[in-house]
Amino acid sequence: MSATSGHWALLRHSAFRRLWIGQAISEIGDGLTGLALAIVVFRLTGSAAALGVLTVLTSIPQLALGLHAGVLVDRWERRRVMVATDLIRAAVVAGLMVVRGPGDLWLLYTLATAHAAASVFFEPARAAILPHLVTRETLLGANSVLQSTRVVAGVAGTALAGVLLALPQGARVAFGVDALSFVASAIAIASLRVPLRTDAPESVHVALVRGLRFLFASPTLVGLLLTFAVTVLGVSAVNVVFVPFVTTELHGSSALIGFMRAAQTVGMVAAGAAIAAVSARVAPARLMAPAILVLALTLCGLALVRHWIPFVPLLIVAGVCSTLIQSSSATLLQQHVPDALRGRIESALDTLLMLVVMAAAAGAGALADRAGTRRVLLGAGLVTLLGGVLAHIALRQPEPARERSAIGS
């Protein structure tokens, strides 16, 4: 079975196809708005610190709302949550069209934060709804298709932003296009049918505690949590020092950096296509440790090269490993968590990982100024290697019966 046929086999399912179309459209819009926001803020202020403020403000909603948002996603009909958040984001992004000068910076910050807050509800709903749309055997393939779509759509959105922002009133056009993308996504998702949760008698606090107890009572989920936390710590440090490393150590231009990111994207998409073709025959738990270990060795290799030419194929390998890790981890989570708890477990992990990303960003930047980007990149590879060892230890045990029956429950 070819990679292409694996994709088409999944897309022949109308429910999954509607979710895929909705995600593809909205991810293009997200890529567009992400770059547009950064450029507009810099144009208005000329300050890198103002960009830092934007990053902090858009990170706060996940930390402040993430845990409780997951509980509400488990309680409400997830299709309606996704449609409502898409429409809210459409209205919020449309509001960005009125930003005209430095005096409107407060409005831009407010709307960008509101957009991030709505996304806190959308992501766990999307992750929780997927097991209802595909079979257990094709769940890994479905996650890989969605991950590949996220990458390609994000790149396309960023490229589109670059074109639109060069036009007169380009920022307003970009935000308008993104608003329309969320409306289109809402229309695509509106026809999905999934069960309505009925655990409303519990208070939000009690429901949250019940979800966290399930998380920490599951050896598989605890292992996944530790593995992902350590791995993300290493990978996030790489993301911080990537541009400075290529610029100072490899003497690369901005065009070369763009080419390298494109090469990494090729690896991610290729891996997604391959997984979709063989997903019914591959256990996600068996992919995690090898993918993380290969990624770790690849990062160490990146730290040792002295020229950009060997750097590019290593980035392609890193892209392949990244898709394998993300698709496998998402599938493991969906398979091992009962439907009634999926939203809150997904949000709990997202919130923890947001903390890890912020810590890595702060630590790697400060360390790079003292020790140099090459040493930080090598250290990130070694940290990721520890994540691979944890995955090998934690995810090799047979899954308990209660976890094997979680999907669709």
Image: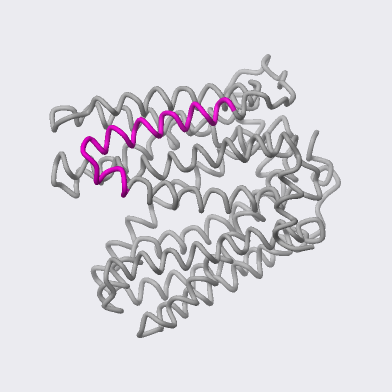
Vertical comparison of 153 with 397: above or below: above
39 vs 281, left or right, is left
Residue 2: horizontal and vertical position, in percent? Answer: 75, 63
Vertical comparison of 64 with 371: above or below: above
288 vs 281, left or right, is left
Looking at the picture, tell me which residue is in the foreground, 161 or 102. 161
Residue 138: horizontal and vertical position, in percent? Answer: 77, 49
Q: Quadrant of residue 88?
A: top left
Vertical comparison of 371 with 305: above or below: above
Residue 317: horizontal and vertical position, in percent? Answer: 55, 72
Residue 26: horizontal and vertical position, in percent? Answer: 49, 37
Q: Main secondary structure of the magenta part?
A: helix
Q: In which quarter of the image is the C terminus?
A: top right
Q: Quadrant of the N terminus?
A: bottom right
177 is within the stretch colored magenta? yes
| Span shown in magenta | 162-187
Q: Quadrant of residue 327?
A: bottom right
Residue ID at (39%, 72%): 377
41 is within the stretch colored magenta? no
214 vs 363, left or right, is right
